[in-house]
Image: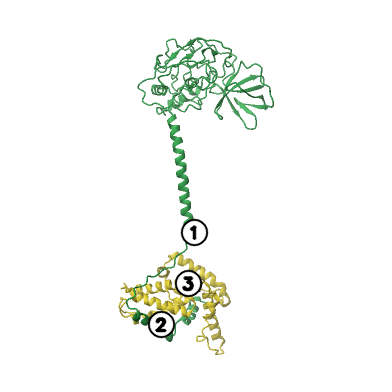
């Protein structure tokens, strides 16, 4: 059956007959005669229903834009804050970045050999900890000059004063090979031979050390200056290498370049005095364990399941482990995950964990 | 083709005489009611006269009348009265006693008549918008572009409406399928 033919023939039934046509014509003419001036009626098209799909698309697009805007509004200030914390003069040059190194990426003024107790070291000490030092580890602070690529820091205005000069010595902060400038001349202060965990942390029994105040002058030509001083008096002194640079977002200038150091110094508050207590002679313990990590301090990662890893070795938590009696010898440790410093006391296979205030946290046994 | 003045105010009766059946059929295909179709036809020509347009061509005038008829039929179909009328009432109007085939006793004639009634009933069972496009396409021999401009829908919309209308008609007309067993559109 061909539908078109059948429909045409069947639709002929729809044709109006003669009477209907006459009837309609008469009605139209009558209406026109009765109302000749009637205005043309606008053809009212029936209102179409709302296109739900279009509404959904538009609504979704508006919602997405709103979410993006809100996220941007929330993120931009945090980004600006983090960018501001980074030294604006931070060079992104390869040398600078390389010298910045790993977790101790900040400028490392390892001349800061504070013997302070935890909580009294500032950022300067932390930044300096990872620097490489020349073979001669006897820093010359008598004249307050630590030469770094020709940059001389004269002790005058800026000096760091150890708040606890008699708190005892601390081993030289561990040096990081990664923080060594590419040219190898960035930091002549840090001890290049002092790698790994050298001596255990100082015995906090009040051994007095020679106190050699060292001041550093902030070069004036430094253009960029960070808003925040790099000195944080509340941070513990990572003498044993536990340098926490995770908070140091000012500059990762481990750079060997003059500009990097100059700009780093610029970050410091020129009114503060920096003094460093320094153990004039320091001989690393030949029995010291090798540097388990490039950063010098132990690196621990605590698991929520109760175990932890320290320098790649796993220690399982021991319930109700008693704190060791002797805590005079301990190691600094840092958790990059938690961004915290810890103190470790090693006794055979046992590892006793303390926080940076020497509060006992728990005991672990090597697996 | 009609060769009259393209001005609406001129030769009004001749234009009405020529296009009234077409307008009536479109209205009837939409509404399936003769009285409503007459009302729509009258309304269309009243608008045609009062608008007083001067058309560009005869095709233009024809397209305007078709568009007006479709829209007026939509308005009537959307009225509260028509919305509550069942479709069965609409198809009852198709049974015009004046058009019933004469019982001539010829089977072939009877079948033809039966077939045409079935086709008409099947078309009237379609949704209103499908009826309009089917009528304009198969009876008025309009192209898809012309239909789309007449009904105010896109060409793709018209094509999809035609396609769906054919799918709906096939099972309704399967009884009268040809030797091949299908209805040829």
Instruction: Give the foreground label among 3 and 1.
Output: 3
Instruction: Judge left or right: residue A226 versus residue B171.
Output: left
Label 1 CA crowd tier, 10 Å (few <14, some 14–19, many 20+):
few
Q: Which residue corresponds to mark 3? A: B79
Give the secondary structure at mark 3: loop
Q: Do discs 3 and 1 belong to a common subunit?
A: no
Q: How many marks?
A: 3
**Foreground residue among B55 and A177:** B55
| Nearer the camera: disc 3 or disc 2 | 3
How many residues crowd around disc 3 within 10 Å: few (fewer than 14), some, or many (20 or more)? few
| Image point (49%, 59%), residue name | A52
- The shade of chain B is yellow
* Disc 2: which residue: A24
**Compared to A342, does A143 lie above or below?**
above
For marks 2 and 1, the one nearer the N-term is 2
Q: Identify the residue at image location x=37%, y=23%.
A: A222
Q: Is residue B120 above or below residue A222?
A: below
Name the residue tied to disc 1. A52
Picture coordinates of residue A344, whole percent (x, y):
61, 21
């Amino acid at each position: 059956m061909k539908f078109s033919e059948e429909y045409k023939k069947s639709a002929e039934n729809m044709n109006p007959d003669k009477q209907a046509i006459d009837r309609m014509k008469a009605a139209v003419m009558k209406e026109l005669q009765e109302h000749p001036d009637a205005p043309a009626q606008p053809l009212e098209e029936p209102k179409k229903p709302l296109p739900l799909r279009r509404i959904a698309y538009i609504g979704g697009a508006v919602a997405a834009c709103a979410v993006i805007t809100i996220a941007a509004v929330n993120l931009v200030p945090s980004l600006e804050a983090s960018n501001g914390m980074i030294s604006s003069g931070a060079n992104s040059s390869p040398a600078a970045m390389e010298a910045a190194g790993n977790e101790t990426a900040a400028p490392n003024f390892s001349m800061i050999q504070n013997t302070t107790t935890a909580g009294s070291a500032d950022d300067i000490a932390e930044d300096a900890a990872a620097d490489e030092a020349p073979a001669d580890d006897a820093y010359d602070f008598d004249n307050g000059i630590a030469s770094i690529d020709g940059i001389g820091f004269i002790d005058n205005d800026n000096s760091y004063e150890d708040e606890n000069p008699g708190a005892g010595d601390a081993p030289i902060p561990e040096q990081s090979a990664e923080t060594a400038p590419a040219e190898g001349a960035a930091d002549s202060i840090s001890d290049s031979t002092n790698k790994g965990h050298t001596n255990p942390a100082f015995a906090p029994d009040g051994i007095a050390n020679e106190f050699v105040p060292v001041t550093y002058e902030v070069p004036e030509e430094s253009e960029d200056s960070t808003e925040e001083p790099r000195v944080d008096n509340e941070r513990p002194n990572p003498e044993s290498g536990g340098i926490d640079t995770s908070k140091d977002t000012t500059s990762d200038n481990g750079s060997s370049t003059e500009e990097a150091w100059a700009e780093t110094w610029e970050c410091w508050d020129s009114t503060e005095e920096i003094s460093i207590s320094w153990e004039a002679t320091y001989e690393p313990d030949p029995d010291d364990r090798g540097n388990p990590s490039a950063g010098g301090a132990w690196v621990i990662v605590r698991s929520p399941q109760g175990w932890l890893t320290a320098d790649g070795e796993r220690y399982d938590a021991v319930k109700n482990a008693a704190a060791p009696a002797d805590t005079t010898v301990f190691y600094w440790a840092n958790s990059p995950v938690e961004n915290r410093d810890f103190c470790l006391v090693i006794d055979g296979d046992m590892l006793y964990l303390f926080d940076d205030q020497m509060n006992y946290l728990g005991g672990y046994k090597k697996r | 083709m009609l060769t009259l003045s393209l001005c609406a105010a001129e030769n009004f009766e001749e234009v009405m005489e020529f296009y009234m059946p077409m307008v009536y059929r479109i209205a009837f295909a939409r509404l399936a009611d003769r009285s409503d179709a007459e009302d729509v036809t009258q309304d269309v020509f009243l608008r045609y006269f009062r608008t007083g347009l001067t058309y560009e061509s005869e095709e233009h005038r024809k397209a305007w009348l078709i568009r007006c008829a479709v829209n007026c039929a939509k308005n009537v179909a959307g009225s509260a009265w028509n919305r509550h009328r069942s479709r069965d009432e609409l198809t009852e109007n198709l049974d015009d006693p004046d058009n019933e085939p004469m019982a001539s006793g010829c089977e072939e004639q009877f079948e033809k008549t039966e077939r045409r009634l079935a086709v008409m009933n099947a078309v009237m069972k379609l949704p209103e918008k499908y009826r309009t496009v089917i009528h304009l396409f198969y009876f008025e021999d309009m192209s898809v572009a012309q239909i789309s401009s007449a009904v105010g829908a896109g060409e793709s919309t018209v094509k999809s409406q035609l396609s769906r209308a054919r799918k709906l008609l096939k099972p309704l007309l399967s009884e009268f399928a040809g030797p091949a067993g299908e209805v040829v559109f």
